[in-house]
Image: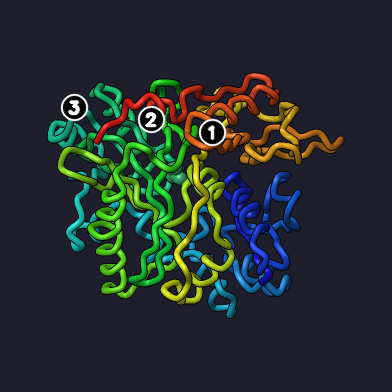
Amino acid sequence: MRVLVIGSGAREHALVLALRKDPAVTALFAAPGNPGTALHAQNHPVDPSSGDSVAALAAELSADLVVVGPEVPLVLGVADAVRAAGIACFGPSAAAARIEGSKAFAKDVMTAAGVRTAHSEIVDTPAELDDALDRFGPTWVVKDDGLAAGKGVVVTADRLAARDHGAELLEQGHPVLLESFLDGPEVSLFCLVDGETVVPLLPAQDHKRVGDGDTGPNTGGMGAYTPLPWLPPETVTAIVDDVVKPVAAEMVRRGCPFSGLLYAGLAIGAAGPAVVEFNCRFGDPETQAVLALLDSPLGELLHATATGTLAEVAPPRWRDGSAITVVIAAENYPGRPRLGDVILGAGESAADATTSVMHAGTALRADGALVSAGGRVLNVVGTGADLAEARANAYARITGIKLPGSHFRTDIGLAAVEDRITV
Ligand code: GLY
């Protein structure tokens, strides 16, 4: 099977690494890819948001399967263009990707499917903002009603900060989504979905705030771990049965069946799981940890999902133990990051079976030096017999990586190791 992965971040690097291990994958391409994917796949330039360009590249490479990593191409219909060219594509249609692309659409689907989620209101003029804020909070949850890579969300007990964020979004012409605050630890559950067939992967937890102890502004994600020692297995079953399956069925009923990866972001409160958001693709940085424990051939699972035969393949098998991702971010991220700094120590070591380094925002300078080229620069993934060991392995690997001005959280997975998370 010849596979083309679309995207250029650490999630795509992790997909490439996992696909490379599948004996059925005979050729692997990434577009545009990054210096990390280039170590295991052939990189090709492409505009990932252009359906015509992606479909043409897939045809030129005789790809049997295209795997679309990021949400923007999916929302823009890249998967539709690839399928129209007669090539199997892992990723939902533009119509189904609205589950992430429009929070209002997602709420509508969830209401129809009877799924618990936050109460919400859309505000699209500054005149409505103050009255609407009075109906929420504290705590206020103020979101951009569109794609904002996690950074369009402010969760705050400070009404003025909530108002400022809402006013700024409206000034930029973006409708604002106000939501009631959902209490409880967050879970990311990724499910392969092919119409009404739903196959969950291991549950994971992201760390969205930039600083240790969940302080500072929201980011695209600073680290993650899997599985979740504090989450009862029956809660995963309940999420699949009471949340993901009803939503998948509702999408079928609406004539926009979901095909690809449906990512349920949930808060596990006293009354049970409630949906914070749905995404239409693999989450980043959780995927890097989840795939590190996958023991089944990834190509087979993705191809079956893409071709409507997911119900016919064996469910995924997982290695024992835990995995953790720690994101190394550039100076000033999540603000405007400093770019172009030389990175040392990020190379692969064949001797190291317990860690790997994924490229998120890197580039090769003309002289061949690896330099930072994005806010989230590298992800270090550690595995171990348990979460404490996975953490120790990842953080030990980080000490060997040098990037001036960079920062990372030191507490990824720590609350779980210290048994401080209860549901
Ligand atoms: N883990 C957050 C995201 O992928 O959106």
Residue drawn 61% across the image and 40% down it: 360
Q: Taking 366 as reference, is 415 left or right?
A: left
Nearer the observer, disc 1 or disc 3?
1
Residue nearest the viewer, comparing 312 with 39: 312
In percent of width and height, residue 418 lies at 38, 24
Residue drawn 69% across the image and 26% down it: 401
Residue nearest the viewer, comparing 340 with 274: 274
Q: What residue type is labelled 3?
A: Pro
SS at mark 3? Answer: loop
Residue 192 against residue 391 in the figure, above or below: below
Nearer the observer, disc 3 or disc 2?
2
Residue at mark 3 to residue at mark 2: CA–CA distance: 27 Å
The single residue placed furthest to the bottom in the displayed view is 86
* Residue 416: image tag: 2
Residue nearest the viewer, comparing 162 with 421: 421
Q: Mark 1–mark 3 contact, CB under 8 Å? A: no
In percent of width and height, residue 46 lies at 67, 58
User: How many neighbours does mark 2 have within 10 angstroms: few (below 14), some (14-19), or many (20 or more)?
Assistant: some
In percent of width and height, residue 258 lies at 38, 67
Residue 187 against residue 159 in the figure, above or below: below
Q: Of marks 1 and 3, which one's residue comes earlier in the chain?
A: 3
List the residue tagged with mark 1.
390
SS at mark 2? Answer: helix
User: How many neighbours does mark 3 have within 10 angstroms: few (below 14), some (14-19), or many (20 or more)?
Assistant: some
List the residue tagged with mark 3.
138
On the question of residue 347 being in view, the answer is yes
User: How many neighbours does mark 1 have within 10 angstroms: few (below 14), some (14-19), or many (20 or more)?
Assistant: many
Q: Which amino acid does label 2 sit on?
A: Ala
